[in-house]
Amino acid sequence: MTGHEEIGDEGRRRRTGRRSVVLKTAGLTLAGALVLGSAVAGWAYWHLNNNIKSVDINNALGDDRPAKAVVTPSASASATEAPLPTEALNILVLGSDSRSGKENKALGGGDSGGARSDTAMVVHIDPGRTTATVVSIPRDTLVTRPSCPLPSGGETAVAYNAMFNSAYSVGGPVCAVKTVEKMTNVRMDHYIEIDFSGFAKLVDALGGVDVTTGQDIDDDLSHLHLKKGAHHLDGTQALALARTRHGIGDGSDLGRIGLQQKLVKALLEQMARISLLTDPAKLYRVADAATAGLTTDTGLDSLNELMRLGQSLKGLSADNARTVMMPVLPAPSDHNRVVAREPGASTLWESLR
């Protein structure tokens, strides 16, 4: 063996050694990144899951409810993957002025004991889940509030000619669901509640919403001052628009409902407009905001269940979501309140069963 051969062999050994070190370092770096990525993803999942508060409405109400629609199971395209649900769905969505926490107080809240359902909508999703009807229930509607179970035990008394939003005040989500089911004879499959700060954060995470107002709005109580026309609103402004009533129309809840329905459409359009799936950071911000102020029934109280619901609604667009208000007329006993106008209200609820 010559000296050249010895040098060549030694050089090859050194190069092989360097490659081995580089490959080991790269492998360790990749493994570390995967572990870190898994840890971050695990923390993010835990955090989002932990955001969601829930109420066991099914257990609280038992069998004293409208019949649940019979679901016909659909065939799965994969033996290992459950198919996305396609059956019709009714969801009671409440926007509450649940006033606990500094953020809610800063946005117009007060004592946490005074929580009310500021906004109430029954969202009916048709079979196939590509079309929907959103029915607003005026908070000033006079109803027969049924006896409701209390978390502390016992029940509330039946109340006649009670304001609709008092159900939430006296019995929380369980009483709100029971009151809606009694007045509509429609089973609520799910319950979703979002508070002041959660709504404002969601709008901000989505980058704001575009809304066109048909008149000037000048409301010192909601701190909203807008000229007639098109506006791009941030979260605080969108919340003020959802709450304003004294700066529009006759100052009643009916005028406010029209603005709330505009916001529903605007939110659906904005969610369709932005590319969340190609921007993980934005997707996380939206998910964090959406779950931060959220209370659901136990059927939707995990990130997996909410994601599955969202995936089943991917074919639903703002253009295919119809917004209506429950037909009402002034209450004979108090013209500052309303009652269901028949037979229109019953016909509407019948169409959602």
Image (cartoon, rainbow, N blue to C red):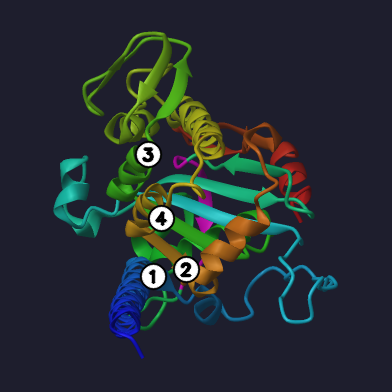
Relative to 3, does residue 265 appear above or below in the rendering?
above
Res. 92 mark: none
Res. 45 mark: 1
The amino acid sitting under disc 3 is Val
Which quarter of the figure has residue 25?
bottom left
Q: Which residue is mark 2?
A: 303
Q: Tell me the CA gap for discs 1 and 3.
A: 21 Å
Q: Main secondary structure of the magenta part?
A: loop
Q: Is residue 245 visible?
A: yes
Q: Are marks 1 and 2 in contact (CB under 8 Å)?
A: yes
Which quarter of the figure has residue 248?
top left
Query: Depth check: 186 or 203 in front?
Result: 203
Q: Secondary structure at mark 1?
A: helix
Res. 287 mark: 4
Q: Are marks 2 and 4 in contact (CB under 8 Å)?
A: yes
- What residue is at 39 percent from the left and 17 percent from the top? 231
Q: Tell me the CA gap for discs 2 and 3.
A: 20 Å
Q: Position of residue 322 (x, y in %)?
A: 67, 35
Q: Quadrant of the N terminus?
A: bottom left
> In the image, is 237 to the left or to the right of 136?
left
Q: Secondary structure at mark 3?
A: helix
Q: Nearer the viewer, mark 1 or mark 2?
A: 1
The amino acid sitting under disc 2 is Leu
